Image (cartoon, rainbow, N blue to C red):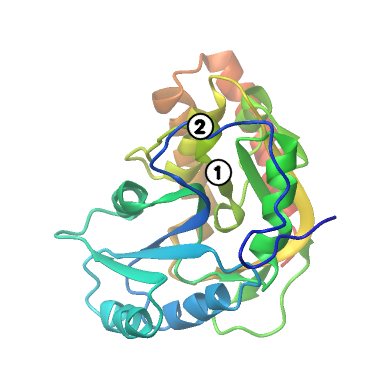
Amino acid sequence: MKALTPDGADAPQGSHERTASSYEDRLVSIVTPAYRAAPFVEETIRSVQAQTYGRFEMLIVDDCSPDDTAAVVQRAAEDDPRIRLLRQQRNGGPAAARNRALDEARGRWIAFLDSDDLWLPRKLELQLPVHLASGAKISCTDFRRIHETGGEPGHLIAAPRWLDYRRLLCNTGIPTSTVLVDRALTGPFRMKETRCDDYACWLDLLRPGGFAIGLHEDLMRYRVLQSSWSRNKVKYSRHVWATYRDVERLGLPQSLWSFANYAVRGAMKYARF
């Protein structure tokens, strides 16, 4: 596998031309919503700054945090112009914060990274050329979970190898903090105001056609917070069901089939840390 150099000079040439002249072709725009993230966001930023591929901008949107999140990000931004702090006027949740960053993003490539998760140093270097060569709209990678306080990572969780829209309905397993989107193929996009805003977005992008691929490289650490709503699997399952019925407008038989597949995969995924 040929890796990208930090300036992108050795990137393979893709078969698709840019569809929006305003996008910087080799720039990765990293979308990071942040709320009450002061204990973790500095480590998250450092994991981005450690990337061996250096053509990125990191757009961190402070969603009116009552703690020192904005101050921590501002200090990092003063030292590194690739880091940008954006402040919301009111607390609007992660979808609104991500949309603010998407509005400001200059890159052809959109990467998502939550404010408490971490990338391994070669994440962009390894993922970009594989994604570009594949013609996929979306790519993701393997990852491991870590406890809130850090420590040894858990077992490897593999990314789905290949998904189109129909397969994605049965598989919510695209980990958001590993996702890379090629806007030359998707065009501009936005998150929906729903609790499963990331999953609904991937469905939106693949519904007209195209596919997502998984790179089987361990490149992200997902921090499991005790306060995270997604830890409550009953609540999360209800939101997945609502995505099928209220967002995707699926009929009852297809919703039941998709939900059954999601539940089985989820049980296998979370059988151990």
Residue 74, visible in the rendered structure = yes
Residue 143, visible in the rendered structure = no
Residue 84 x/y as whole percent:
34, 69
The residue tagged with tag 1: helix, strand or loop?
strand
Query: Disc 2 designates what residue?
Result: 186
Q: CA distance from mark 2 to mark 1?
A: 8 Å
Instruction: Tell me the residue at 55%/31% (across/down).
Output: 185
Circles 2 and 1: CB atoms closer than 8 Å = yes
For this orientation, the residue located farthest to the left is: 89
The residue tagged with tag 2: helix, strand or loop?
helix
Above or below, 113 relative to 128: below
- Comparing 232 with 240, the one in front is 240
- Give the left or right position of residue 16, taking residue 48 as reference: right
- Comparing 223 with 210, the one in front is 210
Task: Count neighbours of disc 1 (C-alpha within 10 A) and say few if under 14, some if 14 to 19, many if 20 or more.
Answer: many
Query: Disc 1 designates what residue?
Result: 181
Amino acid at the residue labelled 2: Thr
- Give the left or right position of residue 86, taking residue 53 as reference: left
- Comparing 102 with 115, the one in front is 102
Query: What quarter of the picture does the C terminus occupy?
Result: bottom right
